[in-house]
Amino acid sequence: MKRIVTIQDISCFGKCSITVALPLISAMGIECAILPTSILSTHTGGFTGFTFRDLSDDIPDISNHWQSCKIDFDTIYTGYLGNEKQINYTIDFIKAFKKENTLVFVDPAMADNGKMYVGFDKDFPAHMARLCSVADIIVPNITEACFLLDVPYTQDYDEDYIKNMLVDLCKLGTKKAVLTGVSFDKQTQGAYFYDSESGKYHFYKRDTIPASFHGTGDTFSSVFAGALTRGFDIERAIKTAVDFTVLTIEKTLPDKESHPYGTKFEECIPQLVDMIK
Ligand code: PXL
């Protein structure tokens, strides 16, 4: 059985990070270990007054114990990290656990729609960029890519702009990059992939659904990391992750008002099990 460790926060209510990764990766038939970096009462989007318990100092202790038990992982999948310290410890963790065939998958979850998430300062993207430098693959949305590259956010771009952005992201040190939420027309959007070693690009898109839900980036990343860990080729892994994410949005759309804090991804788990057969 393959094994992923995911390093990100627990948002106790609201659907994102570990509460999305754990059920989806498990449903894909992959063992999912967790390294919670902080505990929040809710995610930081759409709620005010949330609590934040910083678990940074547990990261090296957990890492040391796991090393003494000779525990290893096929994939290290990182998501939302709350501060510079968590990023530094996560980089140490990767250095300690990365072996020849380990996949280091970094979702630089920190921003969307042109803005950083609440709680991050202007120095944070540079720290996230250091984490990207030790990744095999990163999966920023366009806002995150702009912050990582320190370029102004724009929604007005063409295919050359996206291709150059992917090349620049790989210059941070990662081998591969996927930009999510790429849209060249009003009707469609998708994920654009680049492999700096082969020079290969791949774009997979679907019809745009005019709604946005919290945690869909984590759904995409969890399924994409799971699909790669199962050994799917890049085309199939991207298609599986995009198609499943679209499915969760379609499922939730009729209940948008009562479900603003995440998607009803749970009801789509049977389809995920079918998609990976
Ligand atoms: O979905 C990314 C995410 C993860 N964790 C926390 C968040 C967010 C996005 O806002 O606030 C705590």
Image (tube, grey):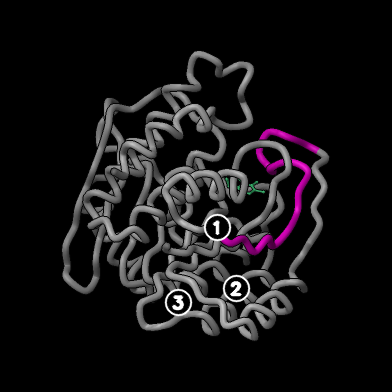
Numbered mark located on residue 90 in the image: 2
Identified at 42% across, 72% down, the residue is 135
Q: Amino acid at mark 3?
A: Val
Q: Give the answer, above or below, for where 256 lies relative to 221.
A: above
Residue 60 location, x and y as percent?
70, 79
Numbered mark located on residue 134 in the image: 3
Mark 2 to mark 3: distance in Å? Answer: 10 Å
Quadrant in which the C terminus appears: top left
Q: Amino acid at mark 1?
A: Gly
Mark 2 to mark 1: distance in Å? Answer: 10 Å
User: Between disc 2 and disc 1, whose residue precedes?
Assistant: 1
Left or right of 247 in this view: 158: left
Left or right of 11 in this view: 194: left
Q: Is residue 171 magenta?
A: no
Q: Which residue is mark 1?
A: 79
Quadrant in which the N terminus appears: bottom left
Q: Give the answer, above or below, for where 233 lies relative to 159.
A: below
Residue 133 makes an appearance in the image = yes
Q: Is residue 45 magenta?
A: yes
Range of residues picked out in magenta: 33-48
Q: Quadrant of residue 151?
A: bottom left
Residue 106 location, x and y as percent?
47, 63
User: Between disc 2 and disc 3, whose residue precedes?
Assistant: 2
Residue 149 makes an appearance in the image = no
Left or right of 42 in this view: 126: left
